Amino acid sequence: MKIIQVHSKLNVYLILFVTLLVIVLPPSTAAISCSKVSSALKKNKSVDYNDLKKCLESFPFNAKLATETVDAVLHFLSNYYVFYDRAREDPPSGFTYQPVDLKNELDSIRKKKFKSDYDFTITLRNIIFKLKDGHTSIFNLCYQRFNYDQGLSLYSVVTTDKKKKKKQIIKVLKDSVDSSNNNCEVIEIGGKPALQAIIDFANDTIQYSKDLSVRFNMALAPSKSQFLRELFQQFTLREDLPETSSIKYKLTCPKKKKPFILERKWKITYHDGFDGFSYSCLEQNNENISNGKTSRDKITKSTLSNKFKTSNSEDLKIAHAKELAAGSLYLLNDKSKTGVVVVDEEQSSDEDSYKDYFQELKKHGTKKIILDMSNNNGGTITVAIFLTSLLFSSKQPNAFPTDIILNNLTISKIENSFKTNSTVDDLYNPNVYLSFPFGNHFNSSSEFIGTQKKRTSNLYFDALTSDEKELLKNVSFPWTSDDIIIITNGFCASACALISLFLSEIHKVRTIAVGGLLNDQMSFSTYPGGQIISPDTVSSSVGDKIADVPGKNVLSFTVREAYDFDQNYTAKDVLEYSYKPADCRLYYDEKNVKDPSLLWLEASKILNNEVKC
């Protein structure tokens, strides 16, 4: 009995001792790091790189959740991703990317034991990024909402030396920390020749184009001051934790005698500040946040209702054109009578504005038109059809043929929708589609499904709405294909790509690509794939047993593909995997990178046959 009492007392003492240890011992390094991250965000200060790295890597790897995530991602991509099989093939000549066997690559990470949930998430994300498909990505609502900013804008310039030999260099467009570095040449980045460092980054890291020259442009500052922050300057503005806490740049400046090293740390903030970080990361749970799902295919923009007002943007320099509509419509200050329409997105609310722009140019007696479609992230599919119909109203068809992947679930949904005469606007409802090329309604579900093994028959994209058809009534413009030219920096994406490709391929409108790598041909558009969708939308439509990707990972992917077609309206090449270089090429210099109207003047000379490409 006494022995029992002694043991009982020892147990009490042990409990007290352990309790004291818990109280006295400091919290873990990871907890301290997350606390420091939270503290910095609360005070609206930059987060320390090492604190953030330790914090992100402190979230434990959950093998069960990881397996469920891989299962869900593979399920949706193998059953609905329209390029699942094609991604395994070697790239066509002109494109630069590696083939991706999604099944093998995703299966391979099931066997790995990751150090942290963050490590697993980045590995999964990098597999999807290899596709170089801007519509297809996976985004973590905790880890990928940090912003990493170097405070530098870099750009590429092509110069000509005394021997008239062209050379491509990297320069500082703007240093928001030290303006004395503006216009300096960047000789090295991280000990590597600067140009090569940017090329390697564009090749390995950027996902949004299969063309390396377009990705190269996206690594740097765009040619216009109004741009999408998350899609440009990706070398100095990132959304994934960089490999190092700082980058060393070797600069040479006109006003400084010797080259010098500039070491720049990352300024780190969180997209939604402390509250967002606390909710998404510190209070992490395994539920999906449906209202957090985002799509890169659509962006918001201030309304164009104040059309024909002058822009008061201090940053935008347009010295060689008269502005007719703020940031959107110009007349060149030369004798060519050339107008410029800036098409920077495709939103249905802008259709009447675009119509007004062309009517305004007609009133001014404009002879030629430049369509500047640079930095265009896409938008609504029918707007692409509307714009091509607006310029070439008498031509049919007015869009590319498309198709959708078929499986047992989607076939069942297609057949049921046709049987019930459903009019619900749904991806797998044949009643909301028209057949290519003549725009007829489908007479049966089997006609919609067609004779292809894994794809539907050829479909139009989306039919024009009644409002769009009304806008197109009694429209007549004097311009032919020879009077129009398209200029882009290669990032004319999604719906923009479909417009520019249709005008180029079908109506033979000439194209100009700006920037990119010296002496390489370059695309004037990127990821025309077709249509972006999320797993929950597909799942709710067809009744899939898997509702979505678990956790905080938001998956999106291409669900419909578009094809080129020949004179007999027979579908040919898949546009996403077709290399379509521009007819003509221009490069940036110290002046035109800051003033796009200088590029417009060069485009006008090409358009008016004053110079050859």
Image (spheres, rainbow, N blue to C red):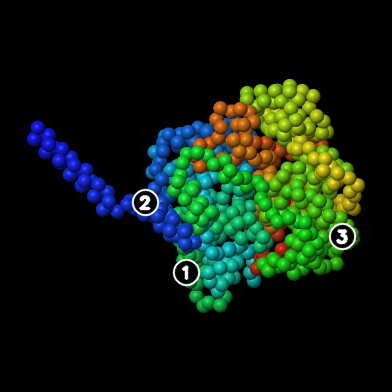
Which comes before the other along the chain, label 1 or label 2?
A: 2
Mark 2, secondary structure of its residue? helix
Badge 3 amino acid = Thr
Measuring 47% from the left and 43% from the top, which residue is drawn there?
Answer: 121
- On the rendered image, what quadrant is the N terminus found in? top left
- Where is mark 2, residue-wise? 30
The label nearer to you, 1 versus 3, is 3
Please identify the quarter of the rendering in which residue 440 is found: top right
Which comes before the other along the chain, label 2 or label 3?
A: 2
Structural distance between the alpha carbons of marks 1 and 3: 51 Å
Mark 1, secondary structure of its residue? strand
Structural distance between the alpha carbons of marks 1 and 2: 33 Å
Residue toward you, 172 or 412: 412
Residue 522 x %, y %: 67, 52
Crowd band around label 3 with a 10 angstrom C-alpha radius: few (<14), some (14–19), many (20+): many
Mark 3, secondary structure of its residue? loop
Measuring 53% from the left and 54% from the top, which residue is drawn there?
Answer: 272
Which comes before the other along the chain, label 1 or label 3?
A: 1
Q: Is residue 141 above or below residue 325?
A: above
Badge 2 amino acid = Ala
Residue 130 x %, y %: 55, 43
Residue 511 x %, y %: 75, 52
Q: Is residue 285 left or right of residue 185?
A: left
- Where is mark 1, residue-wise? 261
Confirm whether residue 565 shows in the render. no
Measuring 88% from the left and 57% from the top, which residue is drawn there?
Answer: 362
Q: Which mark is residue 366?
A: 3
The label nearer to you, 2 versus 3, is 2
Measuring 15% from the left and 41% from the top, which residue is drawn there?
Answer: 10
Please identify the quarter of the rendering in which residue 163 is found: bottom right
Residue 299 x %, y %: 66, 50
